[in-house]
Every structure is written in structure tokens, then in C-alpha cells.
Amino acid sequence: MAQVAEIFLIEAPAEAAAGSRVDIRVHIKSNASTWAGIRVGGALEYGVSPWPGITFPNNWANFPPGESYYFEGYFTMPDKKVTIHAYSYYYADGRWHFDDEKTRDIKLAELVPILSEFKITDYRKV
């Protein structure tokens, strides 16, 4: 259970095509009694080590007590299902402290052929 920076939602698509950019949002609520510095981080689990990170262009903010905020991030979908691991941290005593974690799965989208068969017919007059 989070002390200060509670992750309550990860917005992400249910599936994505390999090689596509996947945009996500990690929603965090401050449970602090005063303003708090809160940071987000994340990684992808899909059978590689170390887990590749998720890019968060803006990865921290100062929160008023009881308020929530979302951080936008992205990654490139690999050629298999992934589990997003989102992490939250709060700033105190001159350093960042790990606080909460939440996960969400994204399936690999199947490629379905649009045309299974087509025929070219020449309609020119001879």
C-alpha cells in the first residue's frame, strides 16, 4: 500500500501491433498531508533482461495534498505480449523513496490479411 504516491490507474490499449508506438497514462494520487514531490517510472516485462524502460518525458511533479495527476509515457511494442510495471516515488529527506507499483498487460495484436485473394482483369479494348 502506498504511503504517499498511490498509483490508481494505468491507461493503455488492450493490444498493440509489433513495432507500433504505445501511449500510456499512469494516474497517481497524493496521500500526503502537505505538498509532495512525486515521480513515476516504468519498465516492460516480456522475457528479456534487463527490462526495457518506458519513456516519460515529464516524470515528476509537485502535488497538493489529496490531488491526483497523470503522467504520459510511451514505448515501442515488441513482438510479444508485455506487462507494464509502473512505479511511484516520493521525495523526502533529500532523496526519492519507492512507494507503489501497479501492472497492466498488453496483448500483441494479430495481423489479419485484408485481401486473401484478388484478381486483376484487363478491360482494355484490343
Image (spheres, helix red, strand yellow):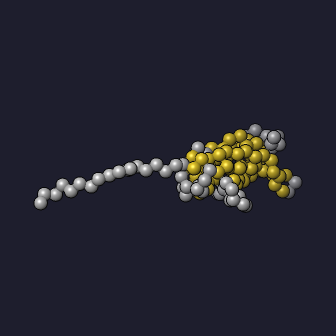
Q: Quadrant of the N terminus?
A: top right
| Horizontal relation, residue 62 to residue 109: left or right | right
Residues 126 and 42: in front is 126
Residue 53: image quadrant is bottom right
35 or 45: nearer the viewer: 45
Horizontal side of 123 relative to 76 (left or right) equals left
Residue 96 position by quadrant: bottom right
Q: Position of residue 63 (x, y in %)?
A: 74, 46
What residue sits 73% from the left and 61% below the top?
50
Q: Residue furthest left?
A: 126
Q: Is residue 9 shown left or right of residue 97? A: left
Residue in the picture at 59% in, 47% down: 107
Q: Quadrant of the C terminus?
A: bottom left
Residue drawn at (49%, 51%) of the image: 111
33 shown above or below 98: above
Name which residue lies at 60% across and 53% down: 80
Estimate the x, y position of residue 97 in percent, counting from the top left: 83, 52
Does residue 123 appear in this view? yes
Q: What is the x, y in percent for residue 8?
A: 71, 40
Count of numbered badges drawn on the protein:
0
Q: Residue furthest top?
A: 66
Q: Horizontal and vertical percent for residue 20?
A: 54, 55
Q: Identify which residue, 126 or 89, lies in the foreground.
A: 126
The outermost residue toward the right is 93
Q: Which of the two residues, 97 or 94, is positioned nearer the viewer here? A: 97
Asked if residue 65 shows in the view, the reply is no
